[in-house]
Amino acid sequence: MADTPKETPKPQAQTKVTETADGSVKITQPKGHKHHGVTILLEPDELVREQVGGFAKFLREYAVIGLAIGFIVGQQANAVVKQIVASFIEPWIEVLFGQNLASRVAYWHHGNVPVTVPWGAFVYAVIEFVFVVVIMYLAVKLLRLDKLKKKKESQQ
């Protein structure tokens, strides 16, 4: 019998997982080695830190806090402006129209069926809108809020 070369098994190349100096994890796979579904198990405190960090990044990236503050301030500004209209503008409207403008209606008849058209509520809403826009414009100009945006744009 002739000597037949014996096949020696090749050592299996292994995936290496190392931690870098900055604390991140690096996974190195040998060339030609395909491994799907790598699972990395983190310690519980690292997992919580990672989730909280992701949430904080989300808040910063999408400016959620600023949006929430703007929403709350906007609601309060809306309440103040509506009260200004109710306290100072409505009495003048009642003097001009003689009664509560929002309750004014017109009746049209379509055959034997009367149709109620609440035109006073629409006119009142338009007047209130105009005054809200004017008051907000004056607030922006008086508080010089329009200058803040220009400074921010010029810094970029």
Image (tube, rainbow, N blue to C red):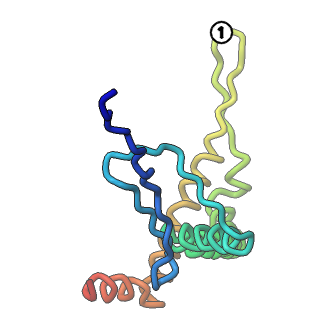
Give me the residue at 66% from left, 74% from top: 49
> Residue 107: x percent and y percent?
67, 28
Q: Quadrant of residue 48?
A: bottom right
Task: Please state if 9 lies on the left or on the right of 79 as rendered.
Answer: left
Give me the residue at 34% from left, 85% from top: 152
**Count of numbered tags:** 1
Asked which secondary structure carries label 1, the reply is loop
Q: Which residue sits furthest front? A: 1
Judge whether residue 131 can be spotted in this image.
Answer: yes
> Residue 55: x percent and y percent?
61, 68
User: Along the line of sight, which residue is nearer the eye, 6 or 71?
Assistant: 6
Q: Amino acid at mark 1?
A: Gly
Give me the residue at 65% from left, 47% from top: 121
* Quadrant housing the N terminus: top left
Residue neighbourhood size for the residue with mark 1, other residues' Cα within 10 Å, grouped as few (<14), some (14–19), many (≥20)? few
User: Along the line of sight, which residue is nearer the eye, 13 or 112?
Assistant: 13
Task: Please state if 121 lies on the left or on the right of 133 as rendered.
Answer: right
Give me the residue at 73% from left, 75% from top: 45
Task: Please state if 136 lies on the left or on the right of 65 as rendered.
Answer: left
Q: Quadrant of residue 126?
A: bottom right
Judge whether residue 84 can be spotted in this image.
Answer: no
* Quadrant housing the C terminus: bottom left
Is residue 90 depicted above or below 106 in this figure? below
Q: Quadrant of residue 99?
A: bottom right
Is residue 74 depicted above or below 141 in this figure? above
Is residue 97 depicted above or below 8 in this figure? below
Residue denoted by label 1: 111
User: Along the line of sight, which residue is nearer the eye, 8 or 43?
Assistant: 8
> Residue 101: x percent and y percent?
67, 53
